[in-house]
Amino acid sequence: MAFVLVHGAGMGAACWKPLLPELDGPVLAVDLPGRGSRASVDVSTVTLDDCARALIADVEQADLHDVVLVAHSFAGVVVPRVLPALAGRLRHVVFLSAVVPPEGTSVLDQIDPAVRAAVEQSISGGVYHQTREGAEAMLCNDLDDEATAWTLDQVTDDSAALLTEVVDLSGLRTDVPRTYVRLTRDMCYPPQLQEPSAARVGGNVAFLDSGHMAMVAVPGELAALLATVHG
């Protein structure tokens, strides 16, 4: 079994670092365009299709099979786009407090109204820029000082289009087993919004007592849950 990890908005592959030692098997943490290994891409130009192509390319280049594909947060609008292309390689798809808006809407339409106002104020020139203070409020409510500082150091600019583009969820009709993991202490994508997203995903539902950054807050518990999913 292999693991492919897809980060959320304002993050890169490095955000998964605390989880990596806990996973047993090959692991691929993907950098979507505009950050990390793909930092040469102008983030203001990045689209959802660009993200999907990057994810497919990385999995195919690594030639991974029997994959548990993990979509955190914003990756909930990227991963459905890759399911038809990668279905034959996938063992299970895990949506980790993933934003899955209704078909025909956007990520921005789906988030909590108080959070949405803060996000809209953070968009300028096609770029979504989170302040350290704003990111701390949304991401770090259950983290200690050291983990908070580390998490905030991972925050990076992102494409505003990824928050405002209309989503395509047609890939969810692909016959791939899936689980939605609801994070009970999440202040960024709170439980009342996770619930309808889980219903759109279908499949199984699991719970973790964690804030939004479960890979930092409870890496051992998250790894144990990922090890139990099956086709």
Image (spheres, helix red, strand yellow):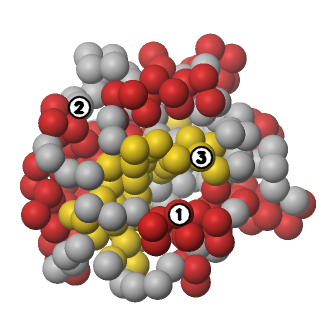
Q: Is residue 101 visible?
A: yes
Of residue 166 and residue 84, the one placed in the foreground of this image is 84
Task: Identify the residue shown where x is 32% and y is 79%.
Answer: 1
Q: Which of marks 3 and 1 is nearer the N terminus?
A: 3
Q: What is the distance, in whole Å, between disc 3 and disc 1 at their CAs?
A: 9 Å
Residue for badge 2? 169
Circles 2 and 1: CB distance less than 8 Å? no
Q: Is residue 86 above or below residue 125?
A: below
Q: Mark 2 or mark 3: which is in front? A: 3
Q: Is residue 143 above or below residue 184?
A: below
Residue 32 position by quadrant? bottom left
Residue 225 got which mark? 1
Q: Crowding at label 3, few (<14), some or many (≥20) Cα neighbours within 10 Å?
A: some
Secondary structure beneath dot 1 equals helix
Task: Identify the residue shown where x is 68% and y is 40%.
Answer: 184
Q: Crowding at label 1, few (<14), some or many (≥20) Cα neighbours within 10 Å?
A: some
Residue for badge 3? 207
Tell me the kind of residue under disc 3.
Phe
Left or right for 83, reference 121: left
